[in-house]
Image (spheres, rainbow, N blue to C red):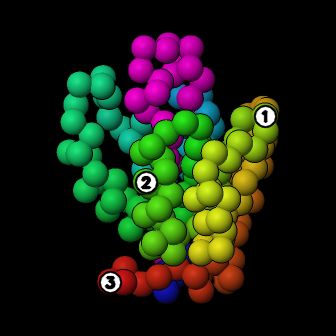
Amino acid sequence: MMDNTKQPLKLLVCTPITAKLGKQAETEKLKAVVAVVEETALERGATIRCAFKEEIWRGREKPEIFVLRDLGWSRECDGAVIIPEKSYGVRIEEGWLSAFGKPFVRLHENTIKRTSDLERHLGFLVPVFDRVFATSQDIVLAVSEFIDFLKSKAATALILPKNW
């Protein structure tokens, strides 16, 4: 089990990327959401990993070159913040996270939108929190609540050993 008092929590932030290509307004909006998540995490003593933030994605790259990195991030994180929208990559990451026993919070803009049975039933495998946001403050509250959960003894008991 991880001792949360000795090292910061590691959050994975999963976002749609390819669907945002060429849509400047949507890309900027997503950047703002990720910035609020990151700022909240840092203020609460957590770090983040986020492909959307860390790479320059133009759509010409082969996604498979990032698969091992993202799989590793899923295995190493303590939990994840997910912006689900329409994204096959995010669905894959949800599968990895549930396989590794990692809890996550899905942030839905304005209303909860679940598009698959996978999304509806992952809560049977790991703690899944669906939260709606309309403002930055809603994101702050959801991420703060999730970090509090991860720091709790209940969540610590759920985190699998790294060699699992």
Q: Count neighbours of disc 1 (C-alpha within 10 A) and say few if under 14, some if 14 to 19, many if 20 or more.
A: few
Q: Earlier in the sequence, mark 2 or mark 3?
A: 2
Task: Give the residue number, with chain letter if any, for mark 2.
Answer: 92
Q: Is residue 28 magenta?
A: yes
* Residue occupying the point 46% across, 27% down: 19
In which image quadrant can residue 54 be found? top left
Element type where label 1 sits in the image = loop
What percent of the width, then of the height, locates residue 58? 30, 23
Three-letter code for the amino acid on which mark 2 is drawn = Ile
Q: Nearer the viewer, residue 25 or 153?
A: 25
As displayed, is residue 90 above or below residue 98? above
What mark, if any, has residue 110 been given in the picture?
1
The x and y percentages for residue 75 are 38, 68
Q: Which residues are magenta?
A: 5-30
Q: Amino acid at mark 1?
A: Asn
Residue 104 on image: x %, y %: 60, 61
Q: Is residue 150 visible?
A: no
Report the residue marked by disc 3: 163
Q: Which residue is found at the position 28% from the left and 51% from the top?
A: 67
Identify which residue is drawn at 30% across, 25% down. 59
